[in-house]
């Protein structure tokens, strides 16, 4: 789960909106591709130590060690995130260990090995939802993963990549209530154990103007889900999958065409062909037109015996910097989703979702810049034509607004950003939800701006005006105003 990846491990995040199955396989609504940090190639030893503490003893402690010695590069990090809970029954304790070794082969290739261990416990036995008569007590997650990758140039424009990976997940969610003597007792221990093994081989040919990636991917999965206090399990399944794919890019003057195709033998819900075709056209030096169409899929839950969830995506838009001091981007999107699984009610709905997004950014003026984004969404049941609304099955916010005020004074080492986030949930009458604006403030001061190794002070204020923005407000609500701050030292 991406939400369990500590942010300190992340180099950058790439977001692909809409069907992306031609490159990633099962990807119904898009892909969040997280790229982890690489070793520091400029120094034999470097590192960072960071600590912060805030409201309800919400603390983040972490350390990094990175460098390159001869042909070997290394990146190691360990950390702990702890909170007594900003709202009832939301305490958490997360321990993280991550490492990556990169070895430059004499043949100009590289060999990379990585390992990650995550142990998370949330809930911490400290909340009882008395008004509901039951306890949503705690969750435990234990995730172990690793990978081995070889990358070898075979010529001036040809590269071979071989990847192997494993991932073991052991997740528990406990529910309970009060017994006759008023003590907490557990009624359920819902456990999911999953083991993934896989390999990927691909050839990459080309350069920045023309390129082609083709490969084959194999996966082996064993999954068991059930209530340990009330056996037998809901399912105990093993399956193998294969994927064969080709993606490329062709640039002709101002036009770039990006085709893709993939054929998957899912091993659990039949076979499927996915395709995509994108194009960009540079209308002027600072203005680009974009269009994209694709068909993709997602796997059903193993215990539903459902069919593949399918989606068709159409997107089109323009981005431009032709207006002085301003960058603008607009996008229209349409997603046709079939056999969409609403997990809360175990039902399947055909739905169409369409809308548009607008983004804007100013260039800095006296070290200050502005950014904003607006999304409008209209979702409907494709069979009945009824508008879909946010409820216990799904979240369908019809409008989202994001605002940001950025300040960056590099010569003083000062940075700050004030963000606002508004979501209109568009829920039916009587459903417990609330739409509101959440304001956050983040400040950073690099004490010696001209030194790369300068200590940094940072401070954050979250939900400054105690806004409420959540669904199911009778039981779950977002935290009110809270603060945290700390010190980061690099060496």
Image: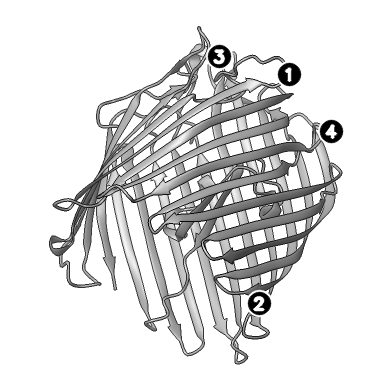
Query: Which residue lies at the image location 76% right of the left edge and 55% below the top edge?
Result: 262
Mark 1 vs mark 4: in front? 1
Residue tagged by mark 1?
A: 383
Residue tagged by mark 4?
A: 305
First along the sequence among labels 3 and 4? 3
Residue tagged by mark 2?
A: 150
Inter-mark Cα distance, 3 to 1: 38 Å
* Callout 1 secondary element: loop
Residue 105 numbered tag: none
249 relative to 261, above or below: below
Q: In which quarter of the image is the C terminus?
A: bottom left
Inter-mark Cα distance, 1 to 2: 48 Å
Inter-mark Cα distance, 3 to 4: 33 Å
Q: Quadrant of residue 214?
A: bottom right
Residue tagged by mark 3?
A: 133
Crowding at mark 1 (Cα within 10 Å: few <14, some 14-19, many 20+): few
Crowding at mark 3 (Cα within 10 Å: few <14, some 14-19, many 20+): few
* Callout 2 secondary element: strand
Query: Would you say residue 461 is visible in this rendering?
Result: no
Q: Where does residue 46 sit, x and y in percent of width and height? A: 35, 76
Q: Where does residue 272 sit, x and y in percent of width and height? A: 82, 46
């Amino acid at each position: 789960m991406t939400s369990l990846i500590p942010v300190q491990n992340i180099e950058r995040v790439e977001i692909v909106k809409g069907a992306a199955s031609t490159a990633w396989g099962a990807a119904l609504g898009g892909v969040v591709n997280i790229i982890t940090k690489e070793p520091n190639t400029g120094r034999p030893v470097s590192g960072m130590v960071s600590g912060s503490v805030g409201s309800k003893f919400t603390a983040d402690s972490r350390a990094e060690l990175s460098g390159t010695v001869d042909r070997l590069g290394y990146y190691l990090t360990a950390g702990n995130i702890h909170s007594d809970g900003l709202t009832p029954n939301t305490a958490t304790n997360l321990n993280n260990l991550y490492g990556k070794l990169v070895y430059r082969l004499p043949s100009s290739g590289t060999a990379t090995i990585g390992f990650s261990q995550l142990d998370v416990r949330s809930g911490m036995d400290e909340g009882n939802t008395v008004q509901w008569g039951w306890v949503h007590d705690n969750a435990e997650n234990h995730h172990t993963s690793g990978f081995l990758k070889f990358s070898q140039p075979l010529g001036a424009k040809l590269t071979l990549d071989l990847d192997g990976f494993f991932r073991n997940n052991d997740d528990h969610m406990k529910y309970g209530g009060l017994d006759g003597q008023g003590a907490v007792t557990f009624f359920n221990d819902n456990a999911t154990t999953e083991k993934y093994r896989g390999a990927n081989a691909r050839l990459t040919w080309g350069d920045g103007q023309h390129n082609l990636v083709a490969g084959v991917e194999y996966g082996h999965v064993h999954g068991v889900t059930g209530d340990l206090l009330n056996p037998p399990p809901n399912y105990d399944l093993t399956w193998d999958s294969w994927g064969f794919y080709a993606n490329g890019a062709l640039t002709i003057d101002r036009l770039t065409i990006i085709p893709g195709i993939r054929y998957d033998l899912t091993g659990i819900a039949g076979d499927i062909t996915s395709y995509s075709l994108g194009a960009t056209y540079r209308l002027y030096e600072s203005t680009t037109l974009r269009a994209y169409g694709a068909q993709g899929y997602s796997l059903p839950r193993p215990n539903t015996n459902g069919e593949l969830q399918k989606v068709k995506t159409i997107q089109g838009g323009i981005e431009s910097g032709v207006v002085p001091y301003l960058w603008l981007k607009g996008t229209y999107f349409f997603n046709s989703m079939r056999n969409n699984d609403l997990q809360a009610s175990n039902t399947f709905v055909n739905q169409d979702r369409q809308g548009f997004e607008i983004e804007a950014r100013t260039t800095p003026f006296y070290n200050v810049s502005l950014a904003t984004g607006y999304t409008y969404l209209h979702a409907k049941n494709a069979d009945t034509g009824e508008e879909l609304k946010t409820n216990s099955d799904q979240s369908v916010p019809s409008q989202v607004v994001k605002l940001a005020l950025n300040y960056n004074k590099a010569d003083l080492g000062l940075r700050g950003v004030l963000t606002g986030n508004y979501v209109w949930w568009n829920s039916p009458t009587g459903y417990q939800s609330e739409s509101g604006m959440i304001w956050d403030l983040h400040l950073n001061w690099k004490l010696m701006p001209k030194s790369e190794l300068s200590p940094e002070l940072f401070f954050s204020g979250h939900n400054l005006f105690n806004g409420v923005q959540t669904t199911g407000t009778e039981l779950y609500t977002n935290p009110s105003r809270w603060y945290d701050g700390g010190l980061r030292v690099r060496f």
